[in-house]
Amino acid sequence: MPNFVDYVYDFYGHPTEALYPLIKDGKLLTKDDIIKAFNVYRKRLITALCVKSSHYTWGDGDSLDRERVRDILINDFNYNWGA
């Protein structure tokens, strides 16, 4: 998980290298919120597995996983696209 958190952070939260910065309350995305969003995603993965749904699948931390965590950060954690 630490590698995945760093991967998400590099895309959306790194102060100098974020390709697509996410901001909330004037501050860049934090690793703590990435971990919280990942935990939401993990619960969705478990639920999908239990009900045999293919809507959520773990791709070993690939770009789709990163984008799903990003969507959770935007939709559930109120992050917005930065400038």
Image (cartoon, rainbow, N blue to C red):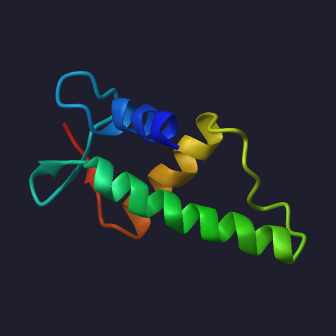
Quadrant (top left/top right/bottom left/bottom right) for the C terminus: top left
Residue that lies at the very extreme toward the right in this rendered image? 52
Point 26% across, 22% down: residue: 17
Front residue (pair 75, 63): 63
In the drawing, does residue 57 fall left or right of residue 68?
A: right
Residue that lies at the very extreme toward the left in this rendered image? 26
From the top left corner, tell me how far across and down residue 10 is, in percent.
35, 29
From the top left corner, tell me how far across and down residue 33 is, in percent.
32, 58
Point 22% across, 42% down: residue: 82
Point 43% across, 41% down: residue: 5
In the drawing, does residue 62 fall left or right of residue 2?
A: right
- Quadrant location of residue 79? bottom left
Q: How many tags in the picture? A: 0
13 versus 40 height, above or below: above
In the drawing, does residue 2 fall left or right of residue 52?
A: left
From the top left corner, tell me how far across and down residue 22 is, in percent.
28, 46
Residue that lies at the very extreme toward the top in this rendered image? 17
- Quadrant location of residue 25? bottom left
From the top left corner, tell me how far across and down residue 6 is, in percent.
40, 34
